[in-house]
Image (tube, grey):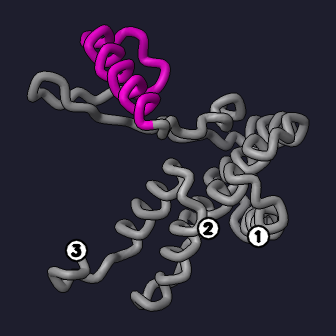
Amino acid sequence: MRRKGFKPDEITMLGVLSACNHGGLVEEGKRWFSKMEEFGLTPKIEHYGCLVDLLGRAGCLEEAERAEKVVKKAITLEPGNDGNYIMLRNLYAAERRWRDVEQIKSLMLTKGAKKEVGCSAIEVNSQVLEFVAGDNLHPHLKALHLVLDQLRMHMKVKDSLPNVDCKAGEA
């Protein structure tokens, strides 16, 4: 993208940070986060959220503790932003702080904060299928599971299974 003369925007950087997060690429994620200024971009709460999650999942506890303070401050500044609560909950889950996860979930319930359901897409037999987590009524459920199982096996062979420890902290 940069070789073609395009400058990344906030959305592109969010995608890059998210990819680093889900790929467990801590140093790469930190490097791209610090490059945002170089591109004339100011990190937003979503960018910090990716970084917080990345550090927490990777066990970078000192940095994650600093991130926890940042997210708590964000909650006081933007109490209506549901994403802040979700970031803090995910950070706690990454650190296996289950009591804190439950406290944040309770706080989210009392404030009416909800996690937006994410949508994923996968190509099966030249057809793009969209699905959401927990959708057991999808008409192509068997095909989706078959492709996901194949991907999982391929990743296992390549020794690149993702870190999914935070799943237990999801709402």
The residue carrying pointer 3 sits among few (fewer than 14), some (14 to 19) or many (20 or more) residues within 10 Å by Cα, namely: few
**Which mark is first along the chain, 3 or 2?**
3
Q: Is residue 91 magenta?
A: no
Residue at 48% over, 40% down: 160
The quarter of the rendered structure image containing the N terminus is: bottom left
At mark 3, the secondary structure is loop
| In the displayed structure image, the side of residue 145 where residue 78 appears, left or right | right
The residue wearing badge 1 is 70
Q: Is residue 151 magenta?
A: yes
Question: What's the amino acid at mark 2?
Answer: Tyr
Question: What's the amino acid at mark 1?
Answer: Val
The residue wearing badge 3 is 1
At mark 1, the secondary structure is helix
**Which mark is first along the chain, 2 or 1?**
2
| In the displayed structure image, the side of residue 34 where residue 84 appears, left or right | right
Label 1 close to label 2 by CB (< 8 Å)? yes
| In the displayed structure image, the side of residue 104 where residue 41 appears, left or right | left
> Which mark is in front, 1 or 3?
3
Is residue 73 in sight in this rendering?
Answer: no
Magenta segment, prevailing SS (helix, strand or loop): helix
Residue at 40% over, 23% down: 153
Distance from Cα at disc 1 to Cα at disc 2: 9 Å
The residue wearing badge 2 is 48
Q: Quadrant of residue 2?
A: bottom left
Stretch of the chain drawn in magenta? 132-158
Distance from Cα at disc 1 to Cα at disc 3: 31 Å
Relative height, residue 60 to residue 126 (above, below): below
Q: Quadrant of residue 12?
A: bottom left
